[in-house]
Amino acid sequence: MAVPPAPEGGKAKRGRAAPAAPTFKREQALLKRGVWPVAGCDEAGRGPLAGPVVAAAVVLDPGRIPKGLDDSKRLSAGQREELFEQICATAQFAVAFASPARIDRDNILRASLWALARAVHALPEAPRHVFVDGRDRIESACDCEAVIGGDGLVLSIAAASIVAKVSRDRLMCRMAREHPEYGFDRHMGYAVPAHLEALARLGPTRHHRSFFAPVMAAREKQLVLTGAGGQAPPEREEATEVAVSGRR
């Protein structure tokens, strides 16, 4: 079978179809049954060594859905920024942050679920149904449905993935101004070689997650170099955790 010509500006991939875009079908089915508002929620930042987990909840306006919504991982930074502005201008949304201190205390999964639940609770209007990306449901006053791979299937979850990702990236860029030597604005706190090198050379900041293995190793190295005893993370103030919401 002949491979169809590649679209202008791209290359055709033999034997691999492009992933289908998320749809509004599940939300539409609930709307037809009189169940509304329906929210989608997702988080960004489970894997990094530094920074908070950021969760977002979005209720799309059925009559004003921005075009091009997709899983944030499939979009460029520019596309995410543009869609972020469109979502915030047309939809109800809320964003919640789980600090590194909470992650250290509760573990990354519990901190993520806490932030997701807080984002849903912070929506301007309480939803009657919630779709959440992943395997785990969250504590909610309404029905909650976990959808594995939901950011690529459910349009409101895809919108939430964009809001969470852009919100977190902007926060990491502000953090980079406080600690320019770590390059947070380039890797967003993930364990890339440049981040690991800076971590080993300079030691952890108050924004690092104390019990992630590379951070623990860097702290132990610093303790050896400085001759300090013990292995407890340095004391730090509990970061302020806020939830923001609205329709701009």
Image (tube, rainbow, N blue to C red):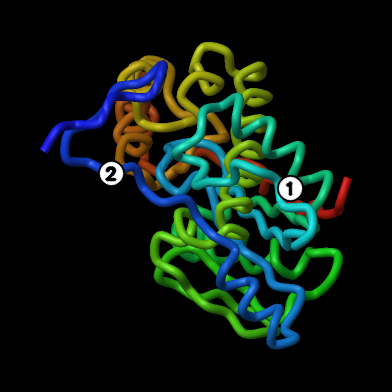
Q: Residue at x 60, y 20 (%)?
A: 176
The residue carrying pointer 1 sits among few (fewer than 14), some (14 to 19) or many (20 or more) residues within 10 Å by Cα, namely few
**Residue 174 seen anywhere in this rendered image of the structure:** yes
Q: Secondary structure at mark 1?
A: loop
CB-based contact (under 8 Å), mark 2 and mark 1: no
> What amino acid type should be assigned to the residue bearing mark 2?
Ala
Closer to the N terminus: mark 2 or mark 1? 2
Query: Along the horizontal axis of the image, is 155 left or right of 85?
Result: left
Judged from this view, the residue extending furthest toward the bottom is 33
> What amino acid type should be assigned to the residue bearing mark 1?
Thr
**C-alpha distance separating marks 2 and 1:** 44 Å
Q: Secondary structure at mark 2?
A: loop
Q: Is residue 118 above or below residue 143?
A: above
Comparing 108 with 173, the one in front is 173
The N terminus: image quadrant:
top left
Mark identifier at residue 240: 1
> Whole-percent x and y of residue 106?
50, 63
Judged from this view, the residue extending furthest toward the front is 2
> Whole-percent x and y of residue 9?
41, 16
**Residue 98 seen anywhere in this rendered image of the structure:** no
> Whole-percent x and y of residue 133?
49, 63
Q: Is residue 220 above or below residue 67?
A: above
Comparing 176 with 131, the one in front is 131
Mark identifier at residue 17: 2
The residue carrying pointer 2 sits among few (fewer than 14), some (14 to 19) or many (20 or more) residues within 10 Å by Cα, namely few
Q: Is residue 118 above or below residue 177?
A: below
Figure label count = 2
Q: Is residue 35 above or below residue 166?
A: below
